[in-house]
Amino acid sequence: MKLIIFWLLLFVILGSLTANVFLFRELRKYYALLYASQLDPIGLSYFQEEIVQAVGDKPTVVFYGDSRAAQWITPKTDEYVFINRGIGNQTSAQVLLRFEEHIRPLQPDAIILQVCVNDLKTIPLFPESKDGIIAACENNIEAIIHKSREFNSVVILTTVFPTSGKVPLARRIVWSEEVYEAIDQVNDFILNYQAEGVIVFDSAGILSNAEGHIKGEYARDLLHLNSAGYNALNSELLTILESMKTEIGLTQNPNTKPRITRISANFLKIRVN
């Protein structure tokens, strides 16, 4: 009996130590993110040493937004110059505020915009502000588009990627079904958005399974894609870029037939069936 008690106590102690180490690491990670955001609230220190050079007459395409944009794998083509200006953990407000520093100097031909998941994942912490958080996302998207159109950049507005639906234990106390509902609401706004020089790319339609979550073969974790997910998006993205020949001076590939479901006043809306 004493031996059993000993092993039980040892198991409890080891379990407690393991849990405390895990919690300490998580706490340290989030404190680091908090203080980093205080030192550089909108990430202006990023990309300072990166030199971007024009390559002939190739169109410049910029991935812009949060970590999902930052992790976007460059499509396999030599027809464009791809630049990445995504920063992890940023909200749509932060992405908007750094536009003048990170996007305007590049004067890109096209901007691929992926934002809002970091706004919407805060709703369980601030449930009383749900409507305001969603409205702010939509307003910030519009503001980024308006700034982009000032120098005639075409905006490829992507729907907010879904999540894997597999919420880690550490996140469960700060997560709720309202996050999924908010993503759907913002995506409805995006899918119905119409403006000159804006292409709506239903990326969520490519990534989602029947339950509305990221397909298992595309998910890296709760919020992020693996390389297969980005490759699936790039397959459609290259088709979209081909459809933009008028805006950015490309030669249309006659073998490429983009799935365009509506055209009006220079607005292209591309959806995934």
Image (cartoon, helix red, strand yellow):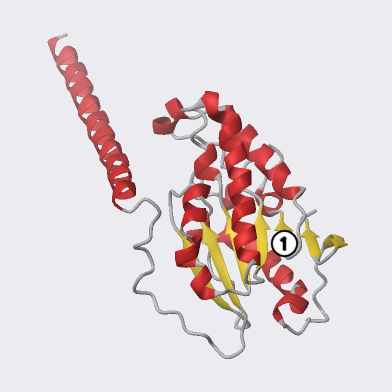
Task: Residue lying at the far top in this picture: please name it.
Answer: 1
Q: Amino acid under label 1?
A: Val
Residue 154 image offset from top left, x and y in percent: 68, 68
Residue 11 against residue 153 in the figure, above or below: above
Say whether residue 31 is visible: yes
Residue 1 in the image: state x and y as whole percent.
Answer: 17, 8
- Identify the element where label 1 is drawn: strand
Where is residue 83 drawn, in percent x and y? 51, 72
Q: Quadrant of residue 196?
A: bottom right
Task: State the residue in front, 115 or 29.
Answer: 115
Residue 171: x and y in percent read 43, 32
Return the residue nearer the eye: 144 or 31: 144
Closer-to-camera residue (268/141): 141
Which residue does the image show at 34% across and 48% down from the upper left? Answer: 37
What residue is rendered at 82% in x and 63% in y?
A: 259
Q: Is residue 125 above or below residue 27?
A: above
The relative height of residue 39 versus residue 250 in the rendered view (above or below) is above
Q: Which residue is mark 1?
A: 198
Q: How many marks?
A: 1
Q: Residues within 10 Å of mark 1 (few under 14, many from 20)?
A: many
- Establish if 185 lies above or below 203: above
| Any part of residue 234 in sight | no
**Residue at horizontal 54%, vertical 87%?**
55
